[in-house]
Amino acid sequence: MVMSDMTYPACNADNNRMEPGLGGGQPRQEFCSVLDNGFMAESIAKIRLLAPYVAENCHPGQFVHLRLPNLEAHILRRPFSVYAADARSGEIQLLYQTVGAGTEHLTTVGRGAQIDVIGPIGRGWQPQPSAKRVLLVGGGLGVAPLYMLAASFRTDVEVHLVMGAQSADRLICREPFSTYITEPCLHITTDDGSAGQHCFTTKVVKDLLDEGSFDYIATCGPEAMQKAVAALAAEHKTVCEVSLERRMACGIGACLSCMVETINGPQRACVDGPVFSALEVIW
Amino acid sequence: MIDDNPAIDDTHLVDKDSLTTVDMGVNLGGLLMANPVTVGSGTFGNGKQYAGFYPLNRLGAITTKGVSGVPWAGNDNPRIAETASGMLNSIGLQNPGVESFVADELPWLATCGVPVIVNVSGHNASEYAAVIQRLETESAVSAYELNISCPNIDCGGMGFGTDPQTAYAVTQLCRKSTSRPLIVKLTPNVTDISEIACAVEAAGADAISLINTVLGMAIDVKRRRPVLARKVGGLSGPAIKPIALRMIYEVYQAVKIPLLGMGGICTASDAIEFMLAGATAVAIGTANFTDPMTAPTVVDGIREFCLEQNIPRVSELTGALL
Ligand SMILES: Cc1cc2nc3c(=O)[nH]c(=O)nc-3n(C[C@H](O)[C@H](O)[C@H](O)COP(=O)(O)OP(=O)(O)OC[C@H]3O[C@@H](n4cnc5c(N)ncnc54)[C@H](O)[C@@H]3O)c2cc1C
Ligand SMILES: Cc1cc2nc3c(=O)[nH]c(=O)nc-3n(C[C@H](O)[C@H](O)[C@H](O)COP(=O)(O)O)c2cc1C
Ligand code: FES
């Protein structure tokens, strides 16, 4: 049997598409140069990558799935939220905490190294365009996916941010956020009281919601915190979105590793999320 | 690494004297594949997610996620854990059932221009057969792969693949339901895989695929708990390649029907090892997660290897261990 003659028609271009993310761009594989990588605080680092496609197409709240360079025994990619993206320079920034082998290794990657990145991935934040007063709540590195969101609001929107950290030295994003969110709207909390209020973010969220109404709340950080914020939002009948973390293998919707239970059935955190409506999630 | 030009003209790559083209086609128990590379069920969704990375007709076939008669919910989180050169999964064959597969996935798969192997699962023999009977009228389906080897469900799955008699019975019942190529997928979690292979061959299987995942476990020492919610799961990836290769080698001696080899294949060289050990075709599974371009890269690498080695037909590699 001669089978080299076997030909198949080319894939239909229209069908040849991935499931939609919200950034207007399908995820692509991009080989990115490291521009800079270094610690910002103990166990918190920032990496800057030249990733023109992600930078141009990324929507606030989306993430990249990054392959750990020169670490063959670690076969799975690692997901990280895009903290900042600049379409003009093609640069993206990620903030990461060293919690295990992969993130520890990532800190050793130097300028000029190449990193294989898939992105931008997932459903990002979807505030109602009519929202006039919004509240962002970030615990720890949960502030990372909120930065592009903060930057995306029109100037007539009143944007509040509750930023929580263990201690003052770990509030690494305070400075950049202050471009978009100024003093009376910036609420800092620390677990040890070394900066801002000596409490958890949820205490401040409760106070703010008791004082006045918001049109939209976005939260990211420890799941227990997000759950508590979601409950407060529900109590005050305020639209709320959460950003959930799950262990991911493919990161593109194929393997069903990353399921989130919702009132609409099981959903994939990677492509149906990571941002979900708080009311949909079954906590 | 992304190759925008799938139709590489190999004639420019070699001198006049040596080979200029390779016949990459293989016949997997009646399923004609334009090249010997497909994907591992459950690692590729139903293809859509990968179609943004390359045209899927660069594959020899697409193998779908496991399809059952009724929707299956799958297991609790966490469902995966990374282990040294591998991963554990306990997805549990979550799928929306055959009706939804026919309505939502098949029409799209039919446009991909590549044979479709539907991976079939069930809790008992008649459930497997019922899925096949439902799909018999669907022209987009080219072949079936019976998953009698999933370690992640409590009832059915691997239970069928660890006992020669039940493996025989489920294969025979499915055989009666179709004349399309019937592939039976075996589990490595047995003492003698050849025995099971002989049973499904005798029951009328056209081909055997192996291996499904190796039962394994990971523990979080600080929490003193298993990492996976289900406690145990299936190990896949490079860590299991030597086991898979040994099993292909053994089964190749034991049966006459062709083999679809898988287990940790990441490179063309890995794939060629499987073919030399006896595989007619190979599947890329977990490596899709590491690099979505793995499968087409392996196809190109096999072709280049054949050109270099003056092998005119890729099928000559099968069982060609010296
Ligand atoms: C959508 C999304 C966005 C994220 N954004 C950020 C971010 O901006 N900054 C940041 O520091 N971290 C972020 N994380 C968490 C980050 O992916 C993990 O901290 C990282 O994968 C840990 O890798 P490791 O090798 O150091 O840890 P290990 O514990 O050695 O990793 C073992 C395995 O578990 C997975 N894993 C471990 N912790 C997590 C986790 N929290 N979430 C998902 N998978 C995990 C790893 O990916 C790996 O597969 C995000 C996670 C998701 C799902
Ligand atoms: C996340 C995941 C899901 C899987 N789902 C299925 C499935 O639905 N049906 C099946 O027959 N095999 C399933 N498998 C097994 C693979 O198809 C393959 O046999 C196995 O992973 C070994 O190959 P690999 O090491 O290349 O991944 C799954 C494997 C993984 C990692
Ligand atoms: S990580 Fe594979 S489906 Fe989400």
Image (cartoon, rainbow, N blue to C red):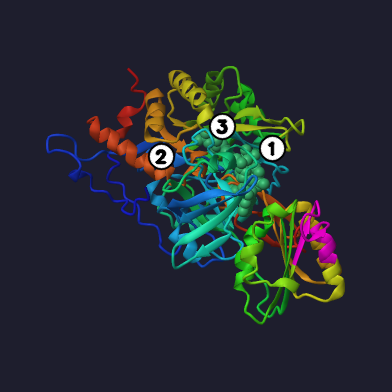
Q: Residue at x 34, y 51 (%)?
A: B3
Residue indicated by mark 3:
B212
Q: Real-space Cα distance between discs 1 and 2?
A: 29 Å
Q: Chain of mark 1?
A: B
Residue B171 sits above or below residue A223 on the image: above
What secondary structure is marked by label 2? strand
The earlier-in-sequence mark between 1 and 2 is 2
Query: Neighbour class for label 3 at 10 Å: few (<14), some, many (≥20)?
Result: many
Q: Residue at x 37, y 35 (%)?
A: B268
Residue indicated by mark 1:
B123
- Dividing the picture into quadrants, the one containing residue A160 is bottom right
Give the magenta range.
Answer: A187-206
Query: Disc 3, disc 2: CB below 8 Å?
Result: no
**Could you tell me residue B217's position as x and y percent?**
67, 29
What secondary structure is marked by label 3? loop
Q: Nearer the viewer, residue A254 or A157?
A: A157
Which mark lies nearer to you, 1 or 3? 3
Residue A127 sits above or below residue A53 on the image: below
